[in-house]
Image (cartoon, rainbow, N blue to C red):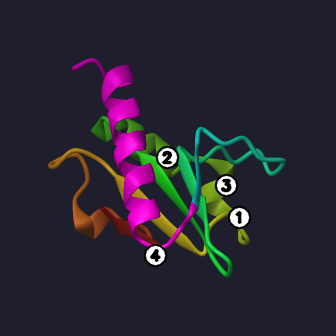
Amino acid sequence: MPDENMHLVLQQAGARWLKDHGFPLVQIESHTVRKEHPDVIGFSLAYSAIIECKTSRADFLRDKEKISRQQPGALGNFRFYLAPEGIIDESEIPSGWMLL
């Protein structure tokens, strides 16, 4: 499956996961004034969560260079990576992030 199609499949799975875990308002491919563009963002009454979908190891490694990853106050009370098995090792997950 080409990366573009896999990316959409991951985004849709991430959106379903957020809805199933208490985030009734979910959006795919959101653009914000902070110039952070999460693949999936969800909101509940009290919290927000973002999911970054990674289809390749190179994409995950490039993610570390994003300005929004290096600034305090980035989007999401909860922050997740979602990738096919084998792309990301749990030991590589930055502090404050989780792997789905």
**What whole-number distance in Å separates the C-alpha atoms at marks 2 and 3?**
9 Å
Amino acid type, callout 4:
Ser
Instruction: Tell me the residue that label 1 is attached to.
Output: 71
Estimate how packed mark 1 is, as few (under 14), some (14 to 19) or many (20 or more) residues with alpha carbons within 10 Å.
Answer: few
Residue at image point 48% right, 55% down: 51
Tag 2: residue type? Asp
**Identity of the amino acid at label 3?**
Ser
At a point 53% along the width and 49% down the height, the residue shown is 40
Among numbered discs 2 and 3, the one appearing first in the sequence: 2
The earlier-in-sequence mark between 2 and 1 is: 2
**Can you tell which mark lies on residue 68?**
3
Tell me the element at label 1: loop
Q: Position of residue 93 (x, y in %)?
A: 36, 65
The amino acid type found where label 1 is placed reads Gln
- Give the residue at the far right of this rendering: 33
From the image, which quarter does the N terminus lie in?
top left
**16 in magenta:** yes
Q: Main secondary structure of the magenta part?
A: helix
Asked if the residue at tag 4 contacts the one at tag 1, i.e. Cβ–Cβ closer than 8 Å, the answer is no
Q: Position of residue 22 (x, y in %)?
A: 48, 73
Residue topped by disc 2: 63
Specify the segment rendered in magenta. 1-24
Q: Earlier in the sequence, mark 3 or mark 4?
A: 3
Provide the residue designation for mark 4.
95
Q: Residues within 10 Å of mark 4 (few under 14, many from 20)?
A: few
Residue 13, magenta (yes or no): yes
Q: Earlier in the sequence, mark 1 or mark 4?
A: 1
Element type where label 4 sits in the image = loop
Evaluate if marks 3 and 1 touch, with contact meaning CB atoms under 8 Å apart: yes
Q: Which x, y percent locates residue 65?
A: 56, 47
